Image (cartoon, coloured by chain):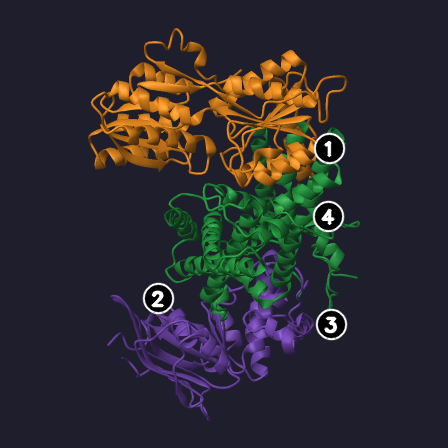
Amino acid sequence: MSASTTTQPTAAAEPDSAPAKTPLVRRVLRLQAFQILLVLLVIIIVFSTLAPHNFANLSNARQIVQNASILAILGVGMTFVIITSGIDLSIGSVMVFSGVIAAKVMIGVGGDGWSTALIGIVASTVTGLLWGVVNGVLIAKAKIPPLIVTLGSLGMALGLAQILTHGVDIRQVPQVMQDKIGYGNVFGQVPTLSIIALVVIAIGMVVLHATRFGRYTYAVGSNEESARRVGVRVDAHLIKIYALSGLLAGFAGVLSLAQFSTTAIAGQSQTNLNVIAAVVIGGTSLFGGFGTIFGTVVGLFIPAVLQNGFVIVGIQPFWQQVAVGAVLIAAVYVDQVRRASAARGRPTRSLLRPGGRKQSRNEGPPEGDAA
Amino acid sequence: MSSTKKWLAVASVALLGGGVLSSCGSAENNSSSSSGGSGGGGGKSIAFIQGVAGDQFYITMQCGIQDEAKKVGASVKVQGPEKFDPTLQKPIVDSVVASKPDAILVAPTDVSAMQAPLKAAADAGIKVVLVDTTVNDPSFAVSQISSDNEGGGKAAFDAIKKLAPKGGKVLVVSVDPGISTTDARVKGFEDATKADPSFQYLGVQYSHNEPATAARIVTAALQKDPDIVGVFATNLFAAEGSATGIRQAGKSGQVKVVSFDAGPDQVKDLKDGTIQALVAQQPGTIGKDGVDQAMAALGGKSVTKKIQTGFTIITKDNMDTSGKSAIYKSSC
Amino acid sequence: MNTEQEHTARPRSGTPVLEARALTRRFGQVTALDGADFDIYPGEVVALIGDNGAGKSTLVKALSGNLEVDSGQVVYKDVVRVIDSPTTASHLGIETVYQDLALAPHLDPVQNMFLGRETMRSGVAGRLGFMDNAAMRKEAREAFDKLGATVRSLDAPVGSMSGGQRQAIAIARAVHWASDVVFLDEPTAALGVRQTANVLDTIRRVASHGVAVVFISHSMPHVMEVSDRVQVLRMGSRVATYDTKDTTMEELVGAMTGATGRSAA
């Protein structure tokens, strides 16, 4: 069977027998992301019992998913960034700025149909990409910490957006965007925004977990110096990561424009922190090297479902903040525990470990392992 | 305890704790608590969605709503976004709609962005009353109730003229362009200023509902034009910040400030002499009218599509007498 | 510049696979390398010893592409080369195991082995970035086995493994990719008795496959046990070379500290 990583000092592994790959199912179950999914399910169950008719129905689920879609797209980019132990605070402002550019371009081009809309989408996405590249270059080449760089671009992007519009929101958006994208549905019931988000999530998952780009992301986050020494082009990779985050922010910006049919310059003020919270709740470590997109998606739903449930049950709005804050701290605590036990050499705990020895907290791998 | 169990324990405690503590908290909010749907019998359920939570204007409105609702036997739930931001308000509106109240009283945070979500609420059979702000096409709403903001802007100008009869430069500090109420106040003030040759209109600047930004704007403006005679602040947070800015510049008393809205801090500033006049809206009345319109619609009776409520000018002279009842509340 | 040694080993036949001639490197006021020489022949094990600050690590960094030199030549198989990056060194067939091992703790042994040199799938999939994990896994397994290193799990992150395991993985990585020379910087410094024995055994095995091994060490017993030659650095230059079987630990220590032979001239 599989060579599990339980430490048994007397076991002499034979050099000839190749350990079979730990089964996929077992590895999934060990993921912190899966454990957070359970927390989400618990929250859903609690609210379903408190408000059975209003909470646990299809149309409520639909609107939760629709409202979380744009954040999910941002979450994909942020997951990549945080895995490299970086951070991107500028996404909200880049969204707004890209939305402004898109709106202006579309007004300039004129028209109400799909061709105009597509031009706007491209304009917005490219704008976001360019901001991301600026971020990446400053971080990778000028060696300025990501927190500072993205804090700066947060201010610059928002300020430029205000300059371009003189502070007045642009509310002219091609009708087809609001109808088909913002509020459109595919197959009748599934919001178009959510399908778009799903596609982005799927691509993100494949890239992160199955391509070299994803592996280098983990490597850079795990030990940037080591990656450099073995020849990974770390600077170029970091630029690409922030470019990706910017590109997705630009894309999200035009989607937000479609959904709200206004550039909402005063909006998105908390988006960056909400997305970061979602990524962290989902199990991605702020210290880099570890994380999943699946976790980010689950992490997104926890505050969304909490807010929705609290509103339906009738709880004062400020409590929602308290609850989300508590969940966030709990998530970071669990990450700490996981990292500490990984460092001590024990495997991370899973819910389903058939049999196996109970391990005491202090036991680590014995130093004299058999050769 | 394994870390997984610990995790679940922490999360459950956080959740249950939040739920227990908040049901104590939410009792203040509900005149009669009912979880979702109408309270059975004749009692209707009303949801009030504020423009921003924690703003005394909306709290006073809430008090008016709750008082009136008690009289007609309806239950009230109150929700509001942390900031005056449609991207924050929309998910709340969607969730409120999912809880299927009989009526929603709402202050939309953007004329375009909130159009579709609120129309969807109306389409779902909920009676929607727009209080304070409005949307591009309010035809789906039962009624729109707000202060006569343009008239209020003009009245603010009149107050400044009374305080600075010789005329001079005046500045407006507003919130964000695109908010129907504050834009109307600016327009009323601007038209009145431009019609009077003894005053010079320096324009309007936006403080994004942040007092700190308003303070910065005013101190910068005073650097540029030290001889400003009057500032009109179009809402509560703008007023707070403007007064701070004038104090910081050391020009209290020299620059006359007229502010819209009459929160406790502004009343204090009025007492201290940093603000000279307050144009108080009547949010309690707006709330009361909102409940009445909603109940009329629910009962199949006729409604009044547009209601404009008035305002009270509060000065140091009348703040303890005739102006006292117009001051906004911090809690009900 | 001091090219005259206090002691030289027996002359060798053939050409050295890697040679350093009069390398000099200054860091501000400090001269880390002062006309240092070095040579190593195919398939031999050379111990590089010297007191603290003698310049051993600096020499290895220069030869492995991690450090520029101010002057001097590096000659690889009779051709003068400029080794300006670790990648250049790798292409020449020189690999290095640093003291900190340069492993990514969150990645598993296979991923670490192939980091920077992943096997891609063929065709479009490869160009899109998809890797051939099965092939890499098989190759890694074989590389570990060849060295007799038992890696218990190919899926666990290396950060959760013991120091000995991680050392084995780092050495296996270097050996796998190196065709000519492997540098080991203090490979036994942090290890216990049994693991040290494994490492020394590994060094012998590697050399027997035709790959030259240079290891820096402070432990004279280990030096005596496993090396063919010993080169001694002192104050940035090579002061002596010994054939291991012709020397003693005392002599080596003496050369390191300068207690015997000529005093600094």
Q: Which residue corresponds to mark 1?
A: A54
- Of callouts 1 and 4, the N-terminal one: 1
In the structure shown, which secondary structural element does the residue marked by tag 2 occupy?
loop
Tint applied to chain A in the drawing: green
Whether pointer 4 and pointer 2 mark residues with C-beta atoms closer than 8 Å, the reply is no
Three-letter amino acid code of the residue under disc 2: Gly
Q: Determine the CA span between mark 4 and mark 2.
A: 72 Å
Q: Which residue corresponds to mark 2?
A: C53
- Tell me which chain the residue with mark 2 is part of: C
- Of callouts 4 and 3, the N-terminal one: 3
**Residue toward you, B135 or C107:** B135
Whether pointer 1 and pointer 3 mark residues with C-beta atoms closer than 8 Å, the reply is no
In front: mark 3 or mark 2? 3
The reply to the same-chain question for discs 1 and 3 is yes
Q: Residue at x 58, y 59 (%)?
A: A114
The reply to the same-chain question for discs 4 and 2 is no
Q: Which residue corresponds to mark 4?
A: A189
Q: Determine the CA span between mark 1 and mark 4.
A: 18 Å
The reply to the same-chain question for discs 1 and 4 is yes
In the structure shown, which secondary structural element does the residue marked by tag 4 occupy?
loop
Q: Which residue corresponds to mark 3?
A: A16
Tint applied to chain B in the drawing: orange
- Tell me which chain the residue with mark 1 is part of: A
In the structure shown, which secondary structural element does the residue marked by tag 1 occupy?
loop
Q: Determine the CA span between mark 4 and mark 3.
A: 56 Å
- Please say whether residue C99 is visible from this viewpoint: no
Q: Residue at x 48, y 18 (%)?
A: B282
Q: Residue at x 79, y 62 (%)?
A: A1
- Of callouts 1 and 3, the N-terminal one: 3
Q: Position of residue A14 (x, y in %)?
A: 74, 68
Q: Position of residue A196 (x, y in %)?
A: 63, 55
